[in-house]
Image: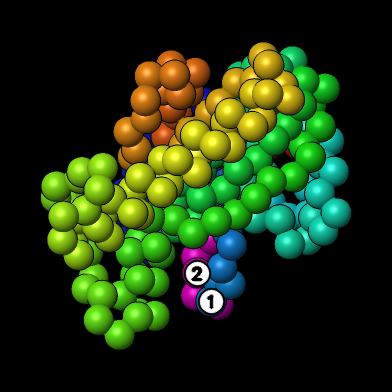
Amino acid sequence: MVKVLTSSNQSLDCLTAICREYSIKQGIVATVIDLNEQVLADLAALPCPLLWLNEQTALPVVNLYETPQTLGYDRMAAVVGANDQFPHRDILVIDAGTCITYEFIDSNGQYHGGNISPGMQMRFKSLYQFTARLPLVTAEGRIIPLGKDTETAIRAGVLKGMEYEISGYIQAMKHKYPELLVFLTGGDDFSFDSSVKNIIFADRFLVLKGLNRILDYNNGRI
């Protein structure tokens, strides 16, 4: 992968121009939501063929997940992206977005599965929606070890709770796999103590790199 283009445009109008400007030969589509007929028609009209990622798509890793039809394509793409960079290492991939996902792939390229927990915004909103009096708090503001009021208690509880959760996963996996590498991707940022921070590879484009690797693998170019 050479270049990443992002857009806040909610339509697909720009894709045709991008395909032509960069002479794109083929693309890959990975989605965890159902697409309406108009979106499907717009994608079909693009001037390049598309590979639709699903549970039947050939992968450059071994998928040991027992229900591949329920495995999020973003989860698998992140694993492939990490494995492509370090193909002979044990890797824990942490994707912090709507949910926090933890994925493990071993040094033999076997994906063993992973765990899913609530993401940052989901935690803040859950405290607000499922209680009678707790306010809706955001991540912006004072963060202290122990809250001095309800707002700081919620903020510290959510953010520190996530930090300790992630650190706990890393420590447990490193105990079993001492040479473990850790990748962190997704939209949420975290602060860690130095013992954890020093072993993390932060890569915001890990999913895109994995999708590109899957596309290459299916084209027989690697």
Q: In the rendered structure, which segment of residues is drawn in magenta?
A: 37-44
Q: Which residue corresponds to mark 1? A: 36
Magenta stretch: dominant secondary structure: helix
- Residue 102 vs 180, above or below: the answer is below
Q: Residue 103 placed where, x, y %?
A: 65, 40
* Magenta stretch contains residue 41: yes
Tell me where residue 111 sits by quadrant. top right
Q: Inspect this view and state whether residue 211 appears.
A: no
Type of amino acid under label 2: Val
Query: Are the residues flagged by discs 1 and 2 in contact, CB closer than 8 Å?
Result: yes
Label 1: element kind: loop
**Alpha carbon distance from label 1 to label 2:** 6 Å
Q: Residue 87 placed where, x, y %?
A: 71, 18
Is residue 193 toward the left or the right of residue 70 in the image?
Answer: left
- Residue 3 vs 31, above or below: the answer is above
Report the residue at 57% width, 48% height from top. Answer: 101
Mark linked to residue 39: 2
Is residue 24 toward the left or the right of residue 161 in the image?
Answer: right
Q: Residues within 10 Å of mark 1 (few under 14, many from 20)?
A: few
Front-lying residue, 96 or 129: 129
Is residue 16 toward the left or the right of residue 144 in the image?
Answer: right
Report the residue at 82% width, 22% height from top. Answer: 108
